[in-house]
Image (tube, helix red, strand yellow):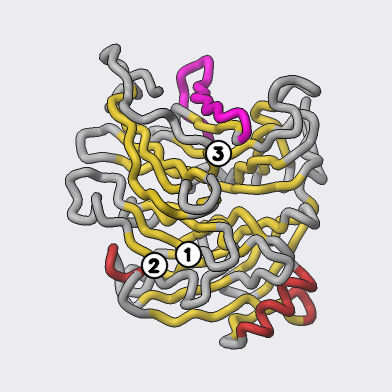
Amino acid sequence: RVKYTDGSESTLKFHEWLDGAGVAPLPDGGYVYVSNSEDDTGKAGVFGLYFDKDGGITNYKALLTGTTWNCGGGMTPWDTWISCEETSTGQCWQVEPNPDKPHHNTPKKTLLGGPKGGNYESVAVDNSNVLNPVFFTTEDNFKGELRRFVADGNGWDSLHEGGVTTYLEFLDGNTFQWTSSLSAGEKSASKHYPNSEGIAYHNSTLYFVSKTIKTIFMLDLTDMTYTSERTGSNFQGQGSFNAQPDQIIKSVHDHDDRKYIYFTEEGNTAPGAHARDGEGTYYTLFRAIPGGRFSGDETVGIAFSPDRKRFYCGYQEEGVLFEITREDGQMFN
């Protein structure tokens, strides 16, 4: 069970098979670490670990139950969490972590997964046009097309009431387009970006990874061009990033020219958490001891506290979540 700052503990046991996660700020200065459970049929869901403004744990509870293989997801601009089911008919659910909001007790299936569903992974949002936010969703399938959903409005209802879905299609000359043809999107995925996983948006650039070919793609949404590279290819310092990339999150500090992207890692004898700066250099934040307790496991649930002074990351199979701070007490870049 989860130990609280006041000495008491949660009624629920901490969920098994933790996976994708995000952080939602609360009005009182506290925050919620929102974490998926990638458990089996009907036993998965989303859980919230509640912190006060000083980083003390005050509550732990279920936010979504009865779902299957909840893998990755993404935060929305209005601080809800989208949780994606990675199963053949999986859907993407919107969850409200704030107990004072009207939808807190009524999580709802979104339009992102379409009527048939799929093996969905992660979601990123371009909210530069607040009237019509754009949601990008990845699918962990060898022909899993990257989906682009332009919503008809903003806020909770925008994910449930209407919008237009198109699919990523790579063209010649490192260019791409958004096509209305699902089959064209699937064909492009199988040829160029199979089994896509983590995804992030920042300043008109969309970043996403294909785990089976260990590649990160960077799409310029203005010029409609893209570049790609093998993850971990230009490495500096101790550690290594040789296994499959999984979840990613983006640095939100525009003043930092290095523009870090943070990665989790699936497999390997010493899986860890890694970062890539804006110049394409990779670094290891931390990693498991080779051949130790976490060997062959995967890192999951990377997220920062709102002040970026606490970094969260876990190991899925062992069911361990770490909170990491800097020795100098400063925030992470």
* Whole-percent x, y for residue 320 in the image: 55, 27
Name the residue tied to disc 2: 110
Name which residue type carries label 1: Gln
**What's the CA distance linking mark 1 and mark 2?**
7 Å
Q: Residues within 10 Å of mark 1 (few under 14, many from 20)?
A: many
Q: How many marks?
A: 3
Query: Which residue is drawn at the image coordinates 39% and 23% (left, top)?
Result: 2
Name which residue type carries label 3: Trp
Give the number of the disc on residue 91: 1
* Whole-percent x, y for residue 77 in the image: 36, 56
Find the magenta span and give its range: 317-333
In the visual, does 75 lie left or right of 278? left
* Whole-percent x, y for residue 24 in the image: 35, 43
Instruction: State if disc 3 and disc 1 touch (CB < 8 Å).
Output: no
Q: Earlier in the sequence, mark 2 or mark 3?
A: 3
Residue 122 lies in quadrant: bottom right
Camera-side residue of 323 and 216: 323
Q: Residues within 10 Å of mark 2 (few under 14, many from 20)?
A: many
Give the number of the disc on residue 17: 3
Instruction: State if disc 2 and disc 1 touch (CB < 8 Å).
Output: yes
- What kind of element bears circle 3? loop
Please tell me whether residue 2 is drawn above or below residue 249 in the rendered image. above
Please tell me whether residue 330 is drawn above or below residue 38 in the rendered image. above
